[in-house]
Image (tube, helix red, strand yellow):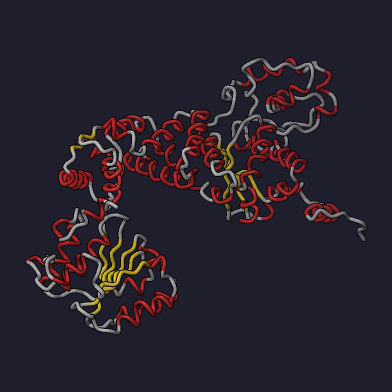
Amino acid sequence: MSTALYRKYRPKIFAEVTGQNHIKTTLQNEISSDRVAHAYLFCGPRGTGKTTLARLLSKAVNCLDLQPEGEPCNKCKSCQDIIDSRALDIIEIDAASHTGVDNVRENIIQNARFTPTKSKNKVFIIDEVHMLSISAFNALLKILEEPPKYVIFILATTEAHKLPSTIISRCQRFDFKKINLNNLVTRLKWIVEQEEIQVDDSVLSLIAKQAGGCVRDSESLLEQVLSLGEKNITMEQAELILPKSNYILLNELFELIINKKTAEALVFVDNLVKDGIDVSLFIEGFIEFVRKILLYKLNGDLEELSREVDDVVVQDIVKKIEKLSTDHMVQIIKKCLSSKELFKQSYIMQLPLEMIIFDLTHTSTGPRSVQLPPAEKVKVVEPVKPAESVAQPEAIKQPPFAAGSAELSEPDKAPIQPPKIVEPTAQIETPVEQIAQSEPVQVPAGEENKNSVKGLPEFQSSWDAILAKVRDANYSLYMSLRMSKPVDLIDDVLHLGFLFELQRKRIENLETKIVLVEIVEAVVGRKLRIETRIESNLSQEDFASNNGGTSSFEDKIQDVANDFGGEVMDNK
């Protein structure tokens, strides 16, 4: 069986390590001056050299013929044993499979009591140390703080934030960085030279970009390309085997969203699922992608993004963001972040992403509402006056947008008196659905949305009608909405203020919100996106109107019975 490239060409001396110069220099100086610490913590992304430098350090502190600048000789008995994985005094432990306190006691604490068998120092390399349990960390504390003079601990982790501060404070911490593109390409060129295979520079650059600053990933991708068996590998051949860059997919989705291509975006998501891509992980990458574009929009620095995507994609992104506002990109990020919990709850894996796309790209059908002069508004409703059906008691019912109109404090408008014949103002605010039901009124084509609400005051006047429809459709939802208040209406986004978190969370449920959006659209004639928030300045009195003013004792008892699905048998 052949050896993987990343194992075959693992650096044998510090000088061969790609990047991480700030760490190499410090370690070599400590080795040369014989001031090696008793515990080290190596943190950083995967494949950046943590385990490699840990082995080099263990080899250098045990080398019998140490070279200048703290380099191991790789020829002595100790170095050869470590290279061949025969050294008994170099103990590598995978914390992910030894998480318990018993493993720490047996493999580390008890073992550390015995002096080295052959080497000068006994070195414990604990990989993925963040996987240890709390009790295991506690057991490790004392030996880590005051180990025997011949013991050195090297802890490696990709998630340093999961380590207790008591562990971190006992170690010398080194943070590993991702390798830049040029250094990765240089290393890949050196490897193909050793393999005596010709690979186009464009292929090596593509591999380095897809590796995302990870040396091991780049060498694994190179091994895939070399498996083609050709002595001269071109870009056309490499594209057959290299996976498509995530950043190309992310950019494709970003373009579909900003161009509001709902159908194409949904097909794109379906293809992601067919290709076996984890949608929840993909949306995390999408958030990071939009974040980087937003940062570039703010400070003009695209260096971090440039390392991971090719120049064509970078230039395409630069052109697109010139037409985008920062508010738009912030809205995309907020929507994605607020929907992350839905990925855990949904039994259809792509549904939350589809809802995100729908919210960000879908616009209400028909032309947008047009502000008309008062005279023109009266003209539109003029034919309604002679219609007898308008004067029927059914039509005299308080329409949704006229409800509460007496509370509007606009000095230039007289308060609307209870009409015997519906006034033009009331008709202007009546939804298209009600006009259509009042025969024989016909709404001209292209004017369906002229009667939709245009501001918060008008929407507040229709809130009682919305609550009434919600009560008929979903009583449980109605009970939650009674403790809410429309507090803001900006563009197509309605903000509902709540006094209590319990009711707010009830509305945030995906199915519940869909029901509410449909009812709001049916009442006000306009599709709105609904957001919720806690309003600390609200009080119980602010919601009195939601409960129909001051309810009688009997009404309150009936509400309680409805909440619990019961029936009032007697009230004494």
Residue sitting nearer the eye, 370 or 519: 519
- Where is residue 464? Give x, y as percent: 72, 40
Work out whether residue 296 can be spotted.
yes
Q: Residue 268's spot in the image, x, y percent?
A: 48, 33
For residue 166, side relative to residue 187 (left or right): right
The location of residue 111, given as percent across then percent down, is 32, 80
Looking at the image, residue 32 sits to the left or right of residue 459; the answer is left
* In this picture, residue 370 sits left or right of residue 53: right
Residue sitting at x 31%, y 40%: 296
Count the marks: how many?
Answer: 0
Quarter holding the C terminus?
bottom right
Q: Nearer the viewer, residue 351 or 520?
A: 351
Q: Dividing the picture into quarters, in which one does residue 333 lie?
A: top left
Q: Is residue 32 left or right of residue 414?
A: left
Rendered image quadrant of residue 568: bottom right
The residue positioned farthest toward the front in the image shown: 1
Q: Residue at x 78, y 22 (%)?
A: 438
Name above or below for residue 184 compared with residue 116.
Answer: above
Residue 133 image offset from top left, x and y in percent = 44, 71
